[in-house]
């Protein structure tokens, strides 16, 4: 039987209060098992980025339950959530979010610096391995501003991989890329899935969603049929 | 850690100028704080820094009408032994030893000598350096600095000859480096009181004067050595006020021939708490200390404001970096650790530079600032440690505040709020105003202090080109009496005018007495100082204007200054003319109480003490052959006549076997500048520091405008996208700036008015004028423009599509 990595039950998220209160997510039940390759689709404002932020431990649900890799998130402190995020989640953003004042290598090493059990002597070796995996190792000493969009996204993927997380979250990973580069990035993600990674992609591009093994549709903060 | 440091340096690289000015500002705070802490115990304690314990001591001296604390003569000091409140009375004496020679007979520098009673050394044996125990009635101790100035020879080779008394002073040891026996006075040589008694002698040479003169000379020399203060332990249960019940004996009637210039007639005994030894000097130092403290707090305030605003702006610019760090697993603690490293490095570099600067200040500003030169000249480890700790703590705490405030608003989360925290709102609202106000105050203070000093110098009511020459008793003293009649006749034979006085034009220390126009015992009598001058004194000095007569011809005619006229009750100076003046206890000036004195002229106040201090009421009386035993006189002449005057003085000295020294003291302008040297130095210092403050203000203003623009960059980009011109965006930003500029200027002017009021109360002079203020306003507008243009340029040079896409 497949082991559940993400489990949510009647999870909701409310922004604001009083008259300006807005419910972005409503009673979301979700189970994603280890090794799945899932697409989360929906129009703008449907709540998919909010859901992704909660799953990726960057935000907290207002109600309901959520557990990641067996850890009930609502019982965790901010410190514990950061720790869990570091060890279990790899984030890939649409706009890459690389730190421009760090080299490519330093960007990839960044998550390792917050990892409690990885020896610092291994940082470089592991970062180079991740860069090799996404075929960008030759740019290790460059700064992000010296790279193309596709190269920057490869670095972002390498950074997401470097801690061997149980879950990779990609928020519109091809949104800022041309079709050829987007194809290359999708190929990298597929390759990671084949190696056993659990991947959740937020997208409103049907072509990208079609490459995933499972598709989830969100509309007005709820699952749509 | 290494990575964090490297990353910090990269951040600094991005804003080099700002970081540099911030470091400089904080390091100056650290340096000044270290020095202020080092000097504070000496200034504010009632005991010398080397003294421990809490036994109450008192110092006894004399207080003049102007509050000056002065030495007390032996006769009157001895009266205090009657007081039941004090235990053993110890006398401390200081004087300058002139005409010293080393063992081989080569003249060496004059020395500030301190005479201690053996009981003093016994009392403080455990607290004083061990070398003090070597002090005996035959051997002296040298300060480290004086020993160095003598070539740091081995102690056993050092014997100092006091040629005036013929005493030989073998050196027993040297005080530790940096040790100062008494704060506020020079103590190059430490001797015992017995040394004076046992070695006192006068070499009269071949021209022995008549016996009655010998007695007078000896009396005066004994008295001149006895510039002494009393020190005693206060017995339990007594307060210093209990001691001051002792009253001075009425001065013995003078025999008309020997009266000391520093007579005690108008002085009262003063008992002060602790062993301060030189409270008058101390008050002067405290004034400087407080001024430097104000400056230091200014550095701190400006530094912290800059740190706050620059970090706010920087952290907002690094928003994406913090979000990313969080996304990859960094907790708040991790982020704080990174920022802690960045701020600690800033603090560390600042304090390293600060400690170096404080050392530099002590080493190189020592000669310039009395505060430093007369107090502890060693940086204390505790002072440095305290200053370093204070600087680093403040930098770290204040440096982290913007992050904590922004983080609290979830600014670094994906679900960030776009609102502003209270601190940020406060900073946005008030900081620019405060920065502009502080910069305005700094610029105005600097311009004003600088120009005021120069202007006051220009407004001195005498011809400052006039040269002062002095004729002083030299090494030997076979005939220390200056024959004024002889001088008068010689000067009268010259084809040009030469004026004379018994006191230096500046730094004069004439004795004070009581004067009134109503009678000898009138309750309205005012303390007044008397200075003896020749009848052509005001003519030669070109003192303008003088109401009435410039040349009093009769012995009972005097000129007073405007302050005296005012304090005597005359609203207009000319109202004082031909009025009768009664002067009490001034027989040394040959004023007899039954002979009326007529005011024949009123002069402008001459700056005898300082350009920045209120003038004292002054009587200028005619210099004439009297009972005053003169050992020095001053001559004043036009620069063109100086060579002839010097020649005349040298002839006169030669006729007295060169027992007198002839000195060209310099032009009055130079002497006045020397007199107020610390003010001129302070003005220079302030001018230099103002440049730094302006640089800091400029970077801060720039950072604030940038932060303001960043927060609204999307708005401006959208404005431009829908057709707004560049000028429309600039106008929008300018409107915000104009309000804060105006409020900053108003605040600045209010602070300036307050400072001006304080300055006027202290020094009775306006520090600022409208002219200076206008100059400062122009400077501040330039400063704002310098900050505004690059900040606007930065925004407008960004591609609109990039701003819109990034958001």
Image (cartoon, coloured by chain):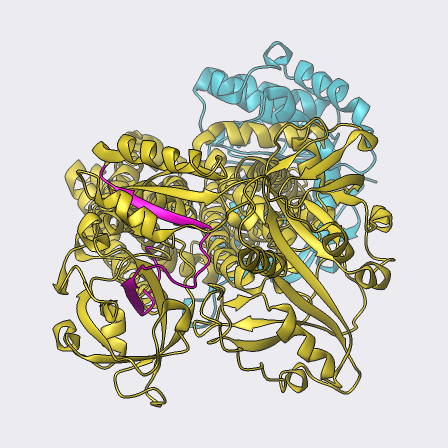
Chain colours: A cyan, B yellow
Tell me if residue B712 comes above or below residue B44 in the rendering.
above
Q: State how many labels appear.
A: 0
Q: Which quadrant is home to the C terminus of chain B?
A: top left
Tell me if residue B578 comes above or below residue B700 in the rendering.
below
B615 drawn magenta: yes
Residue B805 seen in this snapshot? no
Chief secondary structure of the magenta portion: loop
**Residue B84 image-quadrant placement:** bottom right
Residue B70 seen in this snapshot? yes
Write the residue at 46% across / 37% down.
Answer: B21
Query: Relative to the observer, which residue lies in front, B104 or B624?
Result: B624
Residue B703 in picture, x, y percent from top left: 39, 42
Q: Which residues are magenta?
A: B611-638
Query: Relative to the observer, which residue lies in front, A137 or B440?
Result: B440
Query: Relative to the observer, which residue lies in front, B498 or A14?
Result: B498
Write the residue at 73% across / 17% down.
Answer: A129
**In-image side of A37 versus B742 (left or right):** right
B442 drawn magenta: no
């Amino acid at each position: 039987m497949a082991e559940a990595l993400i489990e949510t039950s009647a999870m909701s998220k409310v922004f604001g209060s009083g008259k300006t209160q807005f419910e972005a997510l409503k009673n979301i039940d979700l189970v994603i098992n280890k090794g799945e390759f899932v697409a989360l689709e929906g129009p703008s404002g449907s709540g998919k980025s909010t859901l992704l932020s909660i799953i990726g431990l960057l935000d907290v649900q207002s109600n309901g339950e959520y557990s990641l890799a067996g850890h009930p998130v609502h019982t965790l402190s901010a410190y514990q959530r950061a720790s869990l995020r570091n060890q279990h989640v790899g984030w890939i953003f649409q706009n890459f979010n690389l730190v421009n004042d760090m080299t490519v290598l330093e960007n990839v090493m960044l998550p390792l610096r917050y990892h409690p059990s990885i020896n610092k002597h291994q940082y470089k070796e592991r970062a180079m391995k991740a860069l090799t995996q996404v075929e960008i190792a030759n740019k290790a000493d460059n700064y992000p501003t010296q790279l193309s969009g596709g190269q920057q996204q490869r670095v972002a993927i390498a950074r997401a991989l470097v801690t061997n997380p149980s879950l990779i979250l990609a928020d519109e990973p091809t949104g800022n890329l041309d079709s050829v580069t987007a194809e290359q990035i999708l190929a990298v993600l597929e390759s990671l899935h084949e190696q056993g990674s659990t991947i959740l992609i937020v997208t409103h591009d049907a072509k990208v969603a079609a490459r995933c093994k499972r598709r989830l549709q969100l509309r007005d903060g709820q699952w749509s049929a | 850690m290494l990575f964090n440091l490297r990353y910090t340096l990269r951040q600094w690289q991005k804003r080099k100028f700002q970081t540099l000015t911030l470091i400089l500002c904080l390091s100056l705070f650290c340096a000044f704080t270290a020095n202020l802490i080092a000097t504070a115990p000496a200034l504010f304690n009632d005991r010398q820094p080397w003294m421990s314990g809490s036994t109450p001591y008192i110092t006894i001296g004399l207080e003049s009408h102007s509050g000056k604390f002065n030495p007390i003569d032996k006769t009157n000091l001895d009266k205090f032994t009657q007081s039941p409140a004090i235990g053993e009375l110890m006398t401390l004496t200081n004087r300058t030893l002139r005409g010293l020679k080393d063992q081989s007979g080569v003249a060496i520098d004059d020395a500030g000598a301190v005479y201690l009673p053996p009981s003093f050394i016994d009392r403080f044996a455990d607290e004083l350096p061990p070398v003090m125990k070597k002090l005996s009635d035959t051997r002296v101790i040298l300060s480290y600095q004086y020993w160095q100035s003598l070539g740091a020879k081995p102690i056993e080779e050092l014997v100092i000859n006091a040629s005036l008394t013929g005493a030989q002073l073998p050196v027993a040891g040297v005080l530790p480096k940096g040790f100062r026996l008494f704060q506020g006075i020079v103590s190059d040589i430490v001797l015992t009181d017995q040394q004076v008694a046992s070695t006192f002698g006068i070499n009269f040479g071949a021209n022995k004067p008549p016996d009655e003169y010998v007695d007078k000379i000896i009396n005066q020399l004994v008295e001149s050595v006895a510039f002494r203060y009393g020190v005693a332990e206060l017995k339990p249960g007594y307060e210093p006020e209990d001691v001051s019940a002792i009253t001075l004996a009425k001065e013995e009637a003078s025999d008309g021939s020997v009266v000391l210039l520093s007579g005690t007639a108008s002085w009262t005994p003063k008992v002060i708490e602790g062993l301060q030894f030189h409270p008058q000097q101390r008050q002067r130092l405290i004034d400087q200390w407080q001024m430097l403290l104000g400056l230091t707090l200014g550095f701190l305030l400006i530094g912290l404001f800059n740190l706050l605003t620059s970090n706010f702006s920087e952290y907002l610019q690094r928003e994406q970096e913090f979000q990313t760090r969080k996304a990859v697993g960094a907790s708040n603690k991790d982020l704080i650790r990174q920022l802690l490293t960045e701020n600690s490095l800033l603090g560390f570099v600042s304090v390293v530079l600060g400690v170096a600067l404080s050392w530099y200040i002590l080493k190189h500003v020592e000669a310039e600032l009395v505060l430093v030169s007369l107090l502890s000249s060693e940086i204390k480890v505790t002072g440095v440690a305290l200053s370093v700790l204070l600087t680093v703590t403040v930098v770290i705490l204040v440096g982290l505040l913007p992050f904590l405030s922004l983080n609290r608003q979830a600014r670094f989360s994906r679900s960030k709020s776009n609102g502003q925290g209270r601190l940020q709102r406060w900073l946005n609202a008030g900081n620019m105003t405060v920065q502009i106000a502080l910069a305005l105050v700094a610029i105005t203070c600097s311009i004003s202090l600088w120009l005021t000093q120069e202007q006051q110098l220009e407004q001195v009511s005498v011809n400052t080109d006039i040269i002062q020459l002095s004729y002083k008793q030299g090494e030997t003293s076979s005939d220390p009496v200056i024959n004024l009649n002889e001088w008068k006749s010689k000067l009268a034979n010259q084809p040009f005018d030469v004026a004379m006085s018994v006191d230096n034009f500046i730094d004069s220390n004439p004795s004070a007495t009581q004067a009134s126009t109503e009678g000898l015992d009138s309750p309205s009598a005012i303390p007044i100082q008397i200075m003896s001058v020749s009848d052509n004194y005001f003519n030669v000095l070109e003192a303008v204007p003088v109401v009435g007569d410039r040349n009093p011809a009769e012995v009972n005619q005097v000129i007073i200054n405007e302050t005296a006229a005012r304090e005597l009750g005359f609203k207009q100076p000319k109202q004082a003319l031909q009025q009768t003046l009664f002067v009490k206890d001034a027989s040394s000036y040959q004023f007899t109480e039954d002979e009326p004195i007529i005011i024949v002229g009123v002069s402008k106040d001459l700056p005898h003490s300082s350009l920045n201090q209120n003038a004292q009421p002054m009587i200028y009386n005619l210099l004439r052959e009297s009972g005053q035993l003169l050992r020095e006189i001053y001559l004043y002449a036009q620069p063109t006549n100086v060579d002839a005057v010097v020649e005349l003085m040298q002839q006169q000295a030669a006729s007295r076997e060169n027992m007198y020294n002839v000195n060209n003291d310099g032009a009055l302008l130079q002497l006045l500048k020397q007199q107020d040297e610390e003010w001129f130095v302070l003005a220079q210092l302030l001018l230099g520091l103002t440049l730094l403050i302006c640089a800091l203000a400029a970077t801060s203003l720039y950072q604030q405008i940038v932060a303001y623009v960043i927060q609204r960059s999307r708005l401006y980009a959208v404005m431009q996208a829908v057709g707004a011109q560049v000028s429309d965006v600039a106008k929008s930003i300018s409107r915000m700036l104009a309000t804060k500029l105006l409020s900053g200027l108003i605040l600045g002017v209010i602070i300036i008015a307050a400072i001006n009021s304080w300055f006027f109360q202290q020094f009775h002079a306006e520090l600022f004028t409208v002219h200076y203020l206008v100059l400062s306003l122009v400077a501040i507008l330039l400063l704002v423009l310098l900050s505004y243009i690059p900040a606007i340029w930065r925004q407008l040079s960004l591609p609109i599509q990039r701003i819109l896409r990034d958001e």
